[in-house]
Image: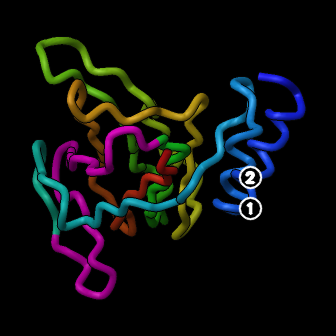
Amino acid sequence: MKPFLAAAVLSASVMLAGPAAAQQAGASADAPEVATARDVYTAWGHDFQLFQGTEGPLNMVTGARTCAADLCGWAAGLHVPSGAKIRSVEFSACDGDATQELQFAFLRGPKVPGEPTLLVPFPGTGIAETPGCTTFTATLTPPETVQNDENAYVFIVNSTPGTDIEWNQYRAVYRLP
């Protein structure tokens, strides 16, 4: 296409479709990804299933879950659209116990038999540290592109029994393509 004709086609597309189409029409293959939306998927404590240990009483004010005996483990699935790019995960917990801690992980497991991949490998709230109530954030580098037809995505929470140690939600921050 002749340069003048190419410029005319681009100008016409700007007038007919507006600035967004012009940016797309003039974008190169090496241009950075442009996200069209940002969202957060929240899995609340009641969305998780206890798979190990003995659960303590639910905190009726915050909805937080506690571990009463042994090592407790909970799991919940992540439900976001295929193609979404998970940028980070956030875990909300309270740790006022100097000898016990909470651990959280995020993993991708294939839907056919195979080993899961830890995307966020079990960071803890800290045994000697007592950060109080806070949100722990782990950034995924690079972001994880969700492929629901091939994989399942799972949040895991492990807790030792203790005093003043509880958790209530897990979030995935993602962008739609």
Q: Quadrant of residue 150?
A: top left
Percent across and percent down for residue 111 are 15, 23
Taking depth in this image into account, of 36 and 127 the one nearest to the observer is: 36
Q: Residue 105 vs residue 70: left or right?
A: right
Q: Residue at x 27, y 54 (%)?
A: 161
Q: Which residue is mark 2?
A: 12
CB of mark 2 within 8 Å of CB of mark 1?
yes
Q: Which residue is mark 1?
A: 15
User: Which residue range is magenta in the image?
Assistant: 57-84
Q: Residue at x 25, y 35 (%)?
A: 148
Please, which residue is most extreme toward the top here? 114
Residue 34 visible within the image: yes
What's the amino acid at mark 1? Met
Q: Residue at x 68, y 44 (%)?
A: 24
Residue 70 magenta: yes
Q: Quadrant of residue 3?
A: top right
What's the amino acid at mark 2? Ala
